[in-house]
């Protein structure tokens, strides 16, 4: 396998705010704490070491030990869970939804990034321990976002009528889907058929893939962990402390012409039960759960926060704060959208006096298999060009490889000169003739453009075999016009190469914020 790396801006696939963050644009400096370079972690470590209570470590250790009791974790995972009790141990975390069969490729890339980052930090700061963490979004209730995945160009869908937090979904409905998916899927058969809930199944297959690297999977849908978050629950639900923090930040970002990602509400929690995860609304001293008959007084809500914190599930605004309250975390690894919405949250952390983690972009990648590479090489295009729009690519190839002159640049210049002279003559004869002459000039220019388009279309027909080859490569590497990593599943490559994940661990550089192109 070979690797080439390109600046993210060249891919034309990332937002301006994300690229500006990577450039460390001074306008964004107020919205994050420290830029995620290895040398900046020493200060982050000292700050988190002082702020993270030892009691939180004890509770985290017990919770994780209980969560792993049924899957027999590897020694590296057991050692890392035990190490979390030590004040010299810190985490690097990524999070993701419980997509079936891991979902799109970038889920794997996220985890590879946190594992490799921990290895580099251990070499740079040997007196500390660094534990890679995958935070399961087990409380999320958006079934539509997790129910499908794409393998070998086909979409596979998990059909179930369950509702509520997806981590609690039972896995009985997987049997039919498992019979449809091609290739060796033993890992997922064992995950979904031998475990009762989706959360348990995901923990199992992630552990099978990454347990040897010591990756710890955290399910925060846990009463003991929620208990640590009670002070923040009260602040948000009873006093709406989050709203003013986020709204002020949003105004500041929008003043800089950046679009904000997430919307803040007065109450940023859901009411959660086995079949329900619905938004809590507050009117006066009363609280209600949307789309239900549940109503509470302020006093009842206060009592429930104290006695049953597991009933309250933070939304996208407060989930990051919850994460940082229960983990001795230094950095969060995410994609462009995640980094962008974290930039909206720094004031929330400052309000609660919780250290704001470093925001680390995950690795971005494109895998080019050998048979695609051979097709690509025949086109004569460079790797830099593969990120261009298909129409631009084909036009560029035709203009470069044709034996005919398909452009009308010289003719356009000549026509412009002719009508400039006619414009002057018209003005000298009768000023009312000028608009007519200029309109005729525009009409002539438009005619030339039509001729040029006709020339190009005709030449494309002559070169159709080669252009179909370009289109085939483009569609293979950018399915549905999107980046491969956002569409295809890792089984596209893992079933052909069971060392695929190991190769990602070998070739991805976690602190190299460029686009990685892996070539078989």
Image (cartoon, grey):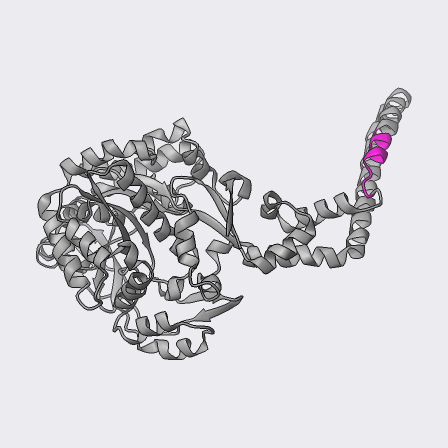
Outermost residue to the top: 428
Q: Percent from the top left, x then y, of residue 291?
A: 28, 64
Q: Percent from the top left, x then y, of residue 346?
A: 28, 37
Q: Is residue 321 above or below residue 184?
A: above
Q: Nearer the viewer, residue 385 or 86?
A: 86
Question: Can residue 21 be seen here?
Answer: yes
Q: Please give left or right for residue 315 compared with residue 50 in the image.
A: right
Q: Please give left or right for residue 22 compared with residue 310 in the image.
A: right
Q: Nearer the viewer, residue 39 or 261?
A: 39
Q: Is residue 352 above or below residue 176?
A: above
Residue positioned 28% across, 73% down in the render = 170
> Magenta stretch: dominant SS?
helix
Residue positioned 26% across, 54% down in the render = 214
- Numbered marks: total: 0
Q: Percent from the top left, x then y, of residue 132?
A: 27, 50
Q: Is residue 244 above or below residue 481?
A: above
Q: Please give left or right for residue 133 compared with residue 406 in the image.
A: left
Q: Please give left or right for residue 514 compared with residue 70 in the image.
A: right
Q: Is residue 410 above or below residue 4?
A: above
Residue 126 position by quadrant: top left
Q: Which residues are magenta?
A: 406-416
Residue positioned 58% across, 47% down in the render = 387
Question: Can residue 229 be seen here?
Answer: no
Whether residue 321 is in magenta: the answer is no
Whether residue 410 is in magenta: the answer is yes
Residue positioned 22% across, 56% down in the render = 77
Q: Percent from the top left, x then y, of residue 256?
A: 42, 31
């Amino acid at each position: 396998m070979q690797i080439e790396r390109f600046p993210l801006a060249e891919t034309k696939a990332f937002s301006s705010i994300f690229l500006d963050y990577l450039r460390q644009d001074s306008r964004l400096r107020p919205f994050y704490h420290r830029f995620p370079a290895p040398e900046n972690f020493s200060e982050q470590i000292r700050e988190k070491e002082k702020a993270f209570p030892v009691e939180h470590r004890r509770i985290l250790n017990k919770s994780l030990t209980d969560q792993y009791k049924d899957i027999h974790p590897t020694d590296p995972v057991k050692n890392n869970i035990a190490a979390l009790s030590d004040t010299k141990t810190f985490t690097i975390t990524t999070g993701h939804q419980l997509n079936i069969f891991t979902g799109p490729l970038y889920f794997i890339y996220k985890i590879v990034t946190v594992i490799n980052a921990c290895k580099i930090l251990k070499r740079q700061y040997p007196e500390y321990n660094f534990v890679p963490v995958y935070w399961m979004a087990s409380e999320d209730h958006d079934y539509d976002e997790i129910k499908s995945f794409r393998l070998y160009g086909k979409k596979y869908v998990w059909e179930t009528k369950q509702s509520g937090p997806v981590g609690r979904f039972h896995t009985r409905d997987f049997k039919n889907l498992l019979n449809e998916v091609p290739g060796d899927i033993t890992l997922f058969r064992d995950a979904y058929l031998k475990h009762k809930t989706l959360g348990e199944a995901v923990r199992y297959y992630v552990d099978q893939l990454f347990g040897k690297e010591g990756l710890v999977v955290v399910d925060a849908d846990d009463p003991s962990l929620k208990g640590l978050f009670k002070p923040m629950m009260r602040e948000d639900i009873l006093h709406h402390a989050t709203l003013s923090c986020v709204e002020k930040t949003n105004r500041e970002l929008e003043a800089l012409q950046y679009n904000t990602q997430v919307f803040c509400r007065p109450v940023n929690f859901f009411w959660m039960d086995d079949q329900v995860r619905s938004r809590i609304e507050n009117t006066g001293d009363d609280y209600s759960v949307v789309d239900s008959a549940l109503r509470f007084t302020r006093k009842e809500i206060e009592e429930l926060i104290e006695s049953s914190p597991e009933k309250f599930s933070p939304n996208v605004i407060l989930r990051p704060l919850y994460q940082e309250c229960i983990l001795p975390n230094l950095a969060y690894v995410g994609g462009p959208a995640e980094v962008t919405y974290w930039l909206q949250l720094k004031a929330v952390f400052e309000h609660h006096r919780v250290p704001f983690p470093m925001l680390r972009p995950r690795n971005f990648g494109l895998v080019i298999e050998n048979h695609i590479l051979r097709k690509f090489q025949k086109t004569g295009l460079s790797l830099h060009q593969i990120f261009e729009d298909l129409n631009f690519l084909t036009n560029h190839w035709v203009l470069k490889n044709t034996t005919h002159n398909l452009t009308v640049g010289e003719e356009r210049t000549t026509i412009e000169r002719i009508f400039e002279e006619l414009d002057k003559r018209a003005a000298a004869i009768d000023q009312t003739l000028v608009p007519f002459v200029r309109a005729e000039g525009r009409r002539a220019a438009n005619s030339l453009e039509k001729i040029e388009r006709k020339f190009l279309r005709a030449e494309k027909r002559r070169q159709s075999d080669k252009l179909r080859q370009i289109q085939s490569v483009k569609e293979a590497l950018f399915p549905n016009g999107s980046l491969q990593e956002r569409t295809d599943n890792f089984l596209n490559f893992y079933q052909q190469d069971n060392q695929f994940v190991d190769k990602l661990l070998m070739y991805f550089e976690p602190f190299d914020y460029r686009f990685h192109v892996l070539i078989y």
